[in-house]
Image (cartoon, rainbow, N blue to C red):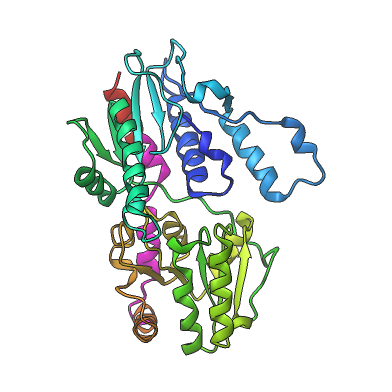
Amino acid sequence: MDCDLMKHKNSGLYYYCLNLGLHIKRILDTERGAGISFYGDPIDLNAFDDPCATINQRNWLRDKKKLGLQPVKWYQKFYRKPNNDHIVWHAPFQSGRVLPNPGEFVKVLLTIHDLNPLHEHIFTDEQRAASLSHTQSLIDKSDALVCISEFSKQDVLRHLDVKHKPIHVIHNGSNPLIIPPVKPIGYQPSRPFLFTLGYVNRKKNFKVLIPLLKSQPNLELVIAGKIDEPDYLHDIEALAVSLGVRDRVHVAGQIPDSDKAWYLKNCLAFMFPSLAEGFGLPVTEAMTFGKPLFLSNRTSLPEIGGDVAFYFEDFDPVYMNTLFTESMIKYKKDNMAEKIIQRGMDFSWEKSAKQYIEVYKTLR
C-alpha cells in the first residue's frame, strides 16, 4: 500500500491511509501467509526527542511508526519493481505516483476518491481535462478499481473509460475520536457555537456560513483546518467585518485531535456546506456525538448523510437561516441524536478493511 500521501499531515487522505492500513494489517496478521507492507517517507526517530515538536508532529510520527513505513526512493516514484512476495500493489488515491510498470506480475488496485475538479468552478476546462487524463492513465495501469462512494463510481463511469475492469464501492470508515477533554487546548467559545472542519479553501465553501451569524446573534462560528487558500480566508474575514460579526468568527487553523473531539461534542450543530466531496469524512466524525448535521446537497454528501442530515439546496442567506431554524426545531422534536449516532456506526474501518481484503483476494 502506497502511503506517500501521509506526508500531508492531518488531511483526509492521511487518516484514510492510517486507519485503513492499520485495520488491514491487524486482520492479515491473523491469516497464515498473508501480510501487507506500507511505503512512504522514512521516519526520523530522533524527532521524537525534539523538545520543539508540537503535539500534532509527535502524533504524526507515532502514526507512521505504527504502520512501519518503508522508504521509497525518489526514482521509485517513476519506476518500481515490487518485492517478489508482493502480489497486489494498492495505489490509494487517483493522483498517486508509485505504480508498478505494466506487464509486471503484481496486480494493481486503484482507489478513486473523487473527480472533484468537475464540480469546482475554480478549474478551467484545460485543468479539468488534465486531471481526467491523469486519472485515466492510472486506470489504464490498474487491474481493478475501488470508489469510496456510489456517487464517485457513477462519476467515473460517466467521464472515464474503465475498460470493463472490476469497479467496487467501499465506503470509508469513521475516524475514531479520543475522549473529549474538559476544555480545549486552543480557543474555547464563550457562547453556543457552530463548528466546521476542513481545509480552508473555496471548495469547502465556509464563507456562506457567515451571514447565518447575522440572523443568529447569539451564536459563534468556529472554523478548524489548514489554511489552504489565504486569500479565501481574507474573503471570509472581510465579509464578517462588513456584516458586523467579526468578533463571532474564530478560525482555529490546524487543531489537535483532542480539540476536534471537544468542538464536536460541545457544538450546537456541525456545518459542512462543501461544494465537492468524494465521501465527506468530517461528517461521519460529527455523527459520533449525534449533533445536528447541516450539509450541502452536492456530490456525495446526501449519500453519506442519508436521512439524518439537513441539506442546503442553495446558499441564499434568508433560505439558509430558515432551514437552520426549522431544522433545529425538528432535531429536538424528533430526538434525532440517537439516529445520527447509529448512522455513524455504519461507517466502520473494520468493515472497510474486510471489504478491501476481499478485493485483494480477487486479484491473486
Q: Position of residue 97 (x, y in %)?
A: 45, 31
Q: Position of residue 93 (x, y in %)?
A: 41, 38
Tell me if residue 289 is in the magenta stretch.
no
| Magenta stretch: dominant secondary structure | helix
Residue 346 seen in render? no
Looking at the rendered image, the quarter that the N terminus falls into is top left
Tell me if residue 336 is in the magenta stretch.
yes
Q: Position of residue 226 (x, y in %)?
A: 58, 57
Q: Is residue 151 above or below residue 39?
A: below
**What residue do we see at 31% from left, 56% from top?**
300
Q: Is residue 85 above or below residue 168?
A: above
- The image quarter containing residue 298 is bottom left
Q: Is residue 148 above or below residue 309?
A: above
- The image quarter containing residue 342 is bottom left
What span is colored magenta in the figure? 332-354
Q: Position of residue 36 (x, y in %)?
A: 46, 24
Residue 143 seen in render? yes
**What residue do we see at 68% from left, 67% from top?**
183
Q: Foreground residue, 352 or 302?
A: 302
Looking at the rendered image, the quarter that the C terminus falls into is top left
